[in-house]
Amino acid sequence: MGEPVIEVQNVSMKFNLSKEKVDSLKEYAIKFLKRELKYNEFWALQDVSFTLEKGDRLGILGLNGAGKSTLLKVIAGVFKPSAGSVMKKGVLAPLIELGAGFDPQYTGRENIYLYGAVLGYSRKFIDAKLQEIIDFSELEEFIDVPLKNYSSGMRARLGFAIATIVEPDILILDEILSVGDAKFRKKSEAKLMSLLERGVTVLFVSHNLEQVRRICNKALILEKGHIVQYGEAEEVIRIYEDMTK
Amino acid sequence: MPIRSRLNKSGKAEWDMERNKVLQNRFILSELIKKGIRLKYRRSYLGIIWSLLEPLLTMIVLTIVFGMLMGVHDRAFPVYILSGRLLYGFYSQSTTTALKSIRANSAMIKKVYVPKVLYPLSGVLYNFIIFLISLIVLAGVSAVLGVRPTMYLFQMLVPLFVLLLLSIGTGLILSTVGVFFRDMEYLWGVVLMLIMYTCAVFYLPEKLLNSRFGWVLKVNPLYCVISNFRSAIFGEWMNWKYLVYSFTFSIVSILIGALLFYKNEDKFILHI
C-alpha cells in the first residue's frame, strides 16, 4: 500500500443555471420583488469519492457533460465543492485548457513569470529554469512578442512547457495529449512518460481509450455526475466500451 | 482523514508550508503589480511619463477655467488644484481597476487557484505606485510657484496612508459587487463624479463649508483626506476631526469589504 496522495470525499458540485442570466441590478430587484428568482439547480457532481495513492494513474471516462472537467477543476482548487472535501498532498500541475490563463498583452517571457508565480514557483526557480522553458517550447524567436500574436498551438506549447518544468507530485491532464503539431506531440508525450516513470500521480481525462489504456492503471466512469464504475483500468474500459457501443 | 493527521504530527512542516504560502502570495502579488504598471502605458510613446503629463495638463485646464475665468487669482492656486486632482485621480483609478479586477482576470481564475483577494489588491497597489511617481509633478509645480516645503510637509504621509486604506476598502466592496452586477461599472462612474464635486478639487471650500450645506463636504472622506494633504503642503496643522473621521471610515470600509469578499469569493467563478 502506498500513501494516499489525493482523497476525494463525497464531493458534490451544484450549479445554478438560471434560464436568463440575471446580472443587472434592475433585473435583480424586479425579479426579487416578484419572487421570480428561481434557478434550475444542476448537480454536475454528486457524491463522488475515491482515493489515489502515490503513483496511481486514474483515467476519467464519460460522455460530454458527465462532469469530468468539473471534477478536475474541483481537485485543482478552481471550484469549491458545494459539499464534500478534497485533500491533496504535494505539488500539483494542472494541464487544463493549456494557455488559457495567459495575458494576451503580455509577452511570452513576462507570461512565464506571471504564470509560474500562479502555479507556485519561486522567482529563483523561474530564473533558473527560464531558458529550459523557452527551449522546450521552441519559442526563442517569439519570446518577447505579446501573446496575442501567438497561434493557439504556440500558446499551448508555452503552457505545457511552464506547467511541466517542475517535477509535480500530481498531474492533471485534460485532453491535452492532442496539442501542437505532430512533432511537439511526440515531444510532450515523451516528457509526460518521463514524469510517469518517476511515480507521479495522474488524473487523466480523455476520449481516446487507447491512450487511457496505455497510461492508466485505474479508471472511473462518470455519468450525470455519479461514479458508475470505479476500478482497474482494463476492466472499466471494457465496461465503458460496452456502454458506448 | 489520514493525510491531515500525518501533517499534524510534524508541526514544523505545517508552519513551513504556511510561511511558503505567504511568500508565494507575495511573489504573485508583486507579479500582478508589475503587470498592471507595465501594461498601463505599453504601446504609448511617452509611456510612464504620461502619469506626470496627464495631471499637469489637467491642472492647466482647470486653472484656466476655475482660476482665470472664474476669478481666483491666488498664485498658488494651481498647486491647490493639482494636489486635489492627483488624490482624486488615484482614488478614481484604483477603485475602478479593483471593480473590474475579477472579471479582468477571469481567464486565470478559471484555471488555477490563487487567493482571489490578490486581484483587487494588486489593482489598488499598482495605481498607488503610479500615483506616488506622479507626485513628482506636484513637487515641481510647487517649486516653480514658490510654495516652499515646511516641517508640516511630513504630515502628508498620514493622509496618503489613509487614502490607500480607503481605496483598498472601497476596492474590495466594489470588486465583489462588480462580479454579480455588471451595472456597477456605469453606476460607479456616476458616483465618482458626485465624489469629485464634493471634495473641492477645483474650488475653495470656505463658502460651501460656511453655508448650511457644509456637511456635504465633511461627510466625504476623500474631501477630508485631500484637505489634510493640502494642509501639509501649505504649512498648516491637519484637521484632527477630518483625520479621525476619514481613518475610521476607511477601516470600516475595509472590514465590510473583506467580509463581503470572503463570503462571496467562492461564488465568483460561477458568475464570470
Image (tube, coloured by chain):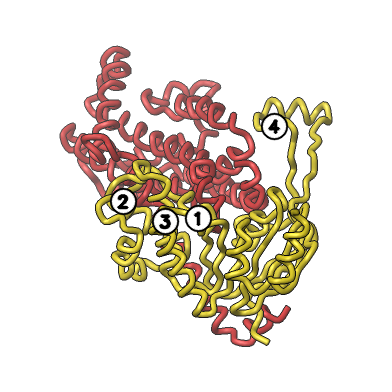
Chain colours: A yellow, B red
Between tags 2 and 3, which lies in front? 3
The residues bearing labels 4 and 2 have C-alpha atoms spaced at a distance of 50 Å
Q: Which residue is mark 4?
A: A22
Instruction: Name the outermost residue toward the left.
Output: B144
Dot placed on the residue nearer the N-terminal end, 4 or 3: 4
> Is the Cβ of the residue at disc 1 closer than 8 Å to that at disc 3?
no
Q: Which residue is mark 1?
A: A178
Using the image, name the chain to which the residue with label 4 belongs. A
> Is the Cβ of the residue at disc 4 closer than 8 Å to that at disc 1?
no
> Is the Cβ of the residue at disc 2 closer than 8 Å to that at disc 1?
no
Using the image, name the chain to which the residue with label 1 belongs. A
Q: Which residue is mark 3?
A: A182
* As drawn, A236 above or below B28: below
The residues bearing labels 4 and 1 have C-alpha atoms spaced at a distance of 37 Å
Quadrant assignment for the C terminus of chain B: top right
Q: Describe the element under mark 2 as helix, strand or loop.
A: helix
- Pointer 4 and pointer 1 on the same chain: yes
Between tags 4 and 3, which lies in front? 3
* As drawn, A154 above or below A90: above
The residues bearing labels 4 and 3 have C-alpha atoms spaced at a distance of 44 Å
> Is the Cβ of the residue at disc 4 closer than 8 Å to that at disc 3?
no
Q: Residue B242: horizontal and vertical position, in percent?
A: 48, 41
Quick check: can you spot residue B174? yes
Q: Which residue is mark 2?
A: B154
Dot placed on the residue nearer the N-terminal end, 4 or 1: 4
- Pointer 2 and pointer 1 on the same chain: no
